[in-house]
Amino acid sequence: MKFGKVADPSVVDFTLPATPLQTFKVLEQYKNRQEFEVFVGCAKWNKNDLKGFYPRGTKDELTYYATQFNSIEMNATFYNAPSKEQVKVWKDKTPSDFKFFPKIPQSISHYSRLLNTDEKVMAFTDSVAFFEEQLGTIFLQLHDNFHPKDFDRLAQFIEKFPKAFPLAVEVRNEAWLSNPDVFNSYCRLLEANDCANIIVDTAGRRDMVHLHLTNDTAFVRYVGANHPSDYDRLDEWLERITEWKKAGLQKLYFFIHQNIEVESPLLATYFIKNLNEALKLNLRYPNKQIPTLF
């Protein structure tokens, strides 16, 4: 994942900001519930990106990947909306506790820019519905140049999105995040529609590590910089997630990217092991100990 890549990660302050008071207010309403659902994975499963991850002779990459992790962030659906038949094929290759988190196709988010997309949305949701109980949260990533002047367009899209499908949203244009009034209005929109506010932790866009949760879900897209600091950053995330769980967090969806994706399984394995220990979980991770590249 090249988004937010910088030439020298060592000069970046990766410290997470303080959790906003509004996040604690949102989580407070869930504090007495017992649920805690955790899915951690990578963004891709193809062998070309995850070189060295698959044992020699692996016949099907997704089948193997799903034995190592419990989820996948599906960037593939951004480029091509899948057919129902394709979704069924993917589902049948994975165990029942594995979940898919598909990205809304660019034909909706980027080319149509959320205008006149009802039929495309219906076709997409009709297809991914065939994941059945293995469908995680669908997520919308807006184009870098999708500006707050189109707030009403986004609001209409979210309000019309089929309520049977959990939705998370990622805004990238800096104007959404730099203007407090705009950002607060955006967060209120997500809260009102029970949508997750996606947090992106990447080197070159520290404004996207806003830590504003808008429902019971933390949906985090973590982008490592192929630098030793990647592991320290994950340690800090573990501390923050522990804090949020005590405050009422019910669902954690944490997907690990890298500028060079080959290292994503290494980071994910490290994170899951520590998450399991800290929160008494039993998430699966690759059994094979792959040597760190650092």
Image (cartoon, helix red, strand yellow):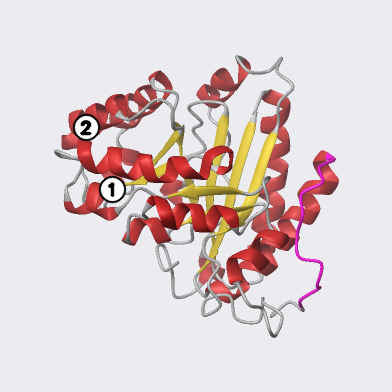
User: Exactly how many numbered labels are in the figure?
Assistant: 2
Question: Residue at point 85% right, 40% down?
Answer: 280
Q: In the image, 274: left or right of 153? A: right
Picture quarter containing residue 24? top right
Q: First in sequence, mark 1 or 2: give its number.
A: 2
Q: Which residue is mark 1?
A: 173
Bounds of the magenta segment: 280-290
Query: Quick one: which residue is furthest to the bottom in this view?
Result: 56
- In the rendered structure, which amino acid carries the disc numbered 1? Asn
- In the rendered structure, which amino acid carries the disc numbered 2? Phe
Viewer-nearest residue: 265 or 130:
130
Residue 273 drawn at (x, y percent): 80, 55
Tell me, yes or no, if residue 229 can be seen here. no
Question: Could you say whether the residue bearing mark 2 is in a helix, strand or loop?
Answer: helix
| Residue 180 counted in the magenta span | no
Query: Quick one: which residue is furthest to the front in this view?
Result: 85
Question: Tag 1: Cα neighbours inside 10 Å, few (<14), some, or many (≥20)?
Answer: some
Question: As displayed, is residue 287 above or below residue 210?
Answer: below
| Residue 282 counted in the magenta span | yes
Question: Residue at point 76% right, 48% down?
Answer: 275
Q: In the image, 143: left or right of 150? A: right
Question: As displayed, is residue 269 above or below residue 190?
Answer: below
Tell me, yes or no, if residue 245 can be seen here. yes
Viewer-nearest residue: 144 or 283:
283
Q: Which residue is mark 2?
A: 151
Question: Residue at point 30% right, 47% down?
Answer: 142
